[in-house]
Image (cartoon, rainbow, N blue to C red):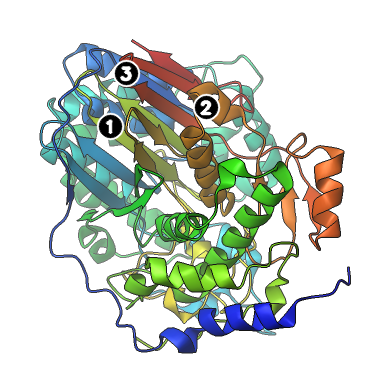
Amino acid sequence: MNFPLDWRALSLGLLMTGAGAFAPVAAAKPPVVTGVQAAPTQQRPGHAAIASANFLATRAGLEVLRKGGNAFDAAIAVASTLSVVEPESSGIGGGFMAVLHRAKDGRNVFIDARETAPAAVDAKAYLDPDGSPNRDTALNGPLSAGIPGEPAGLVLIAKRYGRLSLQQSLAPAIRIARDGFKPDPRLHDSIAEEQKVLQRWPASAAKYLVNGQPPLPGASWRDPDQARTLELIAQHGDDGFYRGETAHKLVDAVRAAGGNWTLADLTGYQAKERTPISVDYRGYKIITAPPPSSGGVAIAEILNILSGYNLSGMDKVQRVHYVVEAMRRAFRDHNDYLGDPDFVKMPLDMLLSPYYADGLRQSILSDRATPSSMLPRAEPADAGMHTTHFSIIDADGNMAAVTLTVNTILGSKFVAAGTGVLLNNEMDDFALVPNKPNAYGLLGSKANAPAGGKRMLSSMSPSIVIGPERTMVIGSPGGSTIITQVLEGILHFIDGENAQQIAAHPRFHHQYLPDVVMVEPGAFDPATSAALEKMGYTLKQREPWGFMNVVTWDRRSNRLDAASDPRRPSGLGEVR
């Protein structure tokens, strides 16, 4: 669509947002401490709430709470149970990111259990002979799999934050895997969708297919190999997965199928505590994920831009316009700057600065969309719908926002024989070919190029929002849309919506490139859509996305609410 632009206003803003304007800003130094300290929570809910993508996982968490566990023990129970009952979205062969809040001392901490590249990674293995990306190698089979982080992350949480033993917290998942469960329709549909790929590897076919076909709906499913692997973790902690019997089986299976893992890759893996990103917006503190997640940086940048506007006083068209333009600019920076903080120097001081946001805001016209092609590409100096999320608040006010993933549906589709472990395909989240899109259409630069031991960039955005009278724990799957889903959830929460309204709210999304606004059915009425198109936006309707799980705490009434996304009927939010 052609339309007139106010070139003077746009030029001023672009001059202020170009990388050169901020070249002198030093990259943020790695934090010395591993948690953001806040005032201890004086008030306690007295009861607990969990919202997850599967009712068996929610009830596993509640079971552990009844045994005397806290939110962090419950998180281990929910995560491990999801590994058994929701393998299309997460599992011990993948990784997770979590924001935890400990009530007794107000400590907020980020747990980084993101997967890492094996030492022998070679970007050329993911290219076709003509130099174009080989999507099959990047998404299917052992070369697509990073070294799993979830087991180490669960062990870390148990050691440092839980009340119960690892055996007690893993017991529900072990029981369900051993005794059996009835898969929900989402898992049946996922297996049917990936049936041909699963048939490539005998262990994958043996686990997910019956005589070469997807299992019949309503049939019970047992997973004794994964039960055994979880038992070894329960008994031996990290050594039960990264060393010994399981480690040898993992490496043998991967290498026999053409992968490049070694025992040293497994023994060298470490889950890490990092300082979460904290941003203030309209009197609310948002505690969210730092790199190697791109989500928290993008959310903070967007909120800093939006802080210059009175969104609550705007009509729907103007509000959407400013939110989309803020999304556009944050995703531009997402593509160019961010990566693993242990490998890449990132200008986080710049990206999180309100002064930088002021410059970005100046490039937004009040009545016109900014074509993404008009925003200069940043040139930094050298220096996942198949994910899942759950939210927990316990009776003492401890909180856990945990997002887990194996990347795309059923991850790599490769099961390591004798372990029950379905491996992730997170190698695709690296910029395997710079400036070529991954499975979610996201571009990347050399900041997110693969290297041995490096964590790939993620969009996972587990977040806790603390306001003057209300608190929220939120997150969602959805690949690149995770960031905008959580952002929109935060804005709706600040506007006063409850957990059910936040999880159900129709969504829209813009990620810089492609230069389109993705819109869920019902998000915009015809008049709003027409007005946005007149401003220069290209709208593209698509099927509903995400699987948001939200817990809110109204501290005035001491009421907890839990909501699972109504787009996916298998989820459960429950208050006890």
Q: Earlier in the sequence, mark 2 or mark 1?
A: 1
Q: Which residue is mark 2?
A: 497
Residue at 33% x, 27% y is 469
Find numbered disc 1 in the image and state the secondary structure of the residue it sits on. Answer: strand
Give how far apart the Cα atoms at labels 2 and 1 are: 20 Å
How many badges with numbers are in the image?
3
Give the image location of residue 35, x and y in percent.
18, 51
Three-letter code, disc 2: Glu
Q: Tell me the mark number nearer the camera, choosing from 3 and 2.
A: 3
Q: Which residue is mark 3?
A: 556
Q: Is residue 7 left or right of residue 394?
A: right
Q: Which residue is mark 1?
A: 399
**In the rendered image, is residue 177 in sight?**
no
Can you tell which quarter of the image residue 439 is in?
Answer: bottom right
Give the image location of residue 65, x and y in percent.
24, 17
- Image quarter where the C terminus lies is top left
Label 3: how many Cα within 10 Å (few below 14, some 14–19, many 20+)? few
Can you tell which quarter of the image residue 179 is in?
Answer: top left
